[in-house]
Image (cartoon, grey):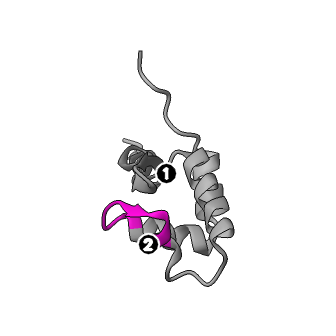
């Protein structure tokens, strides 16, 4: 059984926030702990966790517990869904011959 693709609406909603885009940008470099993600952001750790919950619910980010650390990773399949959607709208119109 295959997993259904993440919801495009949820992904665009998640990416509409600059803080969440900053988190996605950082995770594009590789996995990071919640503390590492929160370090450059000027807000409380609970607020950063709320942003991560939105990203996780959208399918863009996955978190897992490794010992005492929560590790976050970007989910490439979600980005591919967005890329395919955008590319489908950038296709040149078919010629009428």
- Residue hosting label 1: 60
Frontmost residue, 45 versus 6: 45
Which of the two marks, 2 or 1, is nearer to us in this view?
A: 2
Residue 36: mark: 2
Left or right side of 13 for 39: left
Q: Residue at x 42, y 55 (%)?
A: 71
Look at the image and tell me in which quarter the C terminus lies: top left
**Who comes first in sequence, dot 2 or dot 1?**
2
Left of 90 or right of it: where is 43? right
Return the x and y of residue 42 as percentages of the image width and height: 61, 84
Distance between mark 2 and mark 1 Cα atoms: 18 Å
Image-quadrant location for residue 90: bottom left
**The furthest residue to the top:** 1
Residue 15 colored in magenta in the image? no
Residue 43, quarter of picture: bottom right
Magenta-highlighted residues? 27-37
Instruction: Indicate the secondary structure of the residue bearing disc 2.
Output: helix
Q: Is residue 88 visible?
A: no
Residue closest to the far left: 30
33 inside magenta stretch: yes
Residue 52 or residue 8, whichever sits in front: 52
Q: Is residue 30 above or below residue 88?
A: below
- SS class, disc 1: loop
Mark 1 surroundings within 10 Å by alpha-carbon count, few (fewer than 14), some (14 through 19), many (20 or more): many
């Amino acid at each position: 059984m295959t997993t259904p693709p993440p919801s495009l609406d949820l992904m665009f909603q998640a990416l509409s926030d600059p803080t969440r885009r900053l988190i996605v940008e950082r995770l594009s470099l590789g996995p990071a702990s919640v503390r590492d993600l929160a370090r450059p952001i000027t807000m409380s750790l609970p607020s950063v966790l709320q942003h991560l919950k939105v990203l996780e619910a959208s399918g863009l980010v996955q978190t897992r517990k490794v010992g005492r650390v929560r590790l976050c990773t970007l989910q490439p399949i979600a980005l591919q869904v967005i890329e395919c959607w955008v590319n489908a709208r950038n296709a040149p119109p078919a010629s009428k011959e």
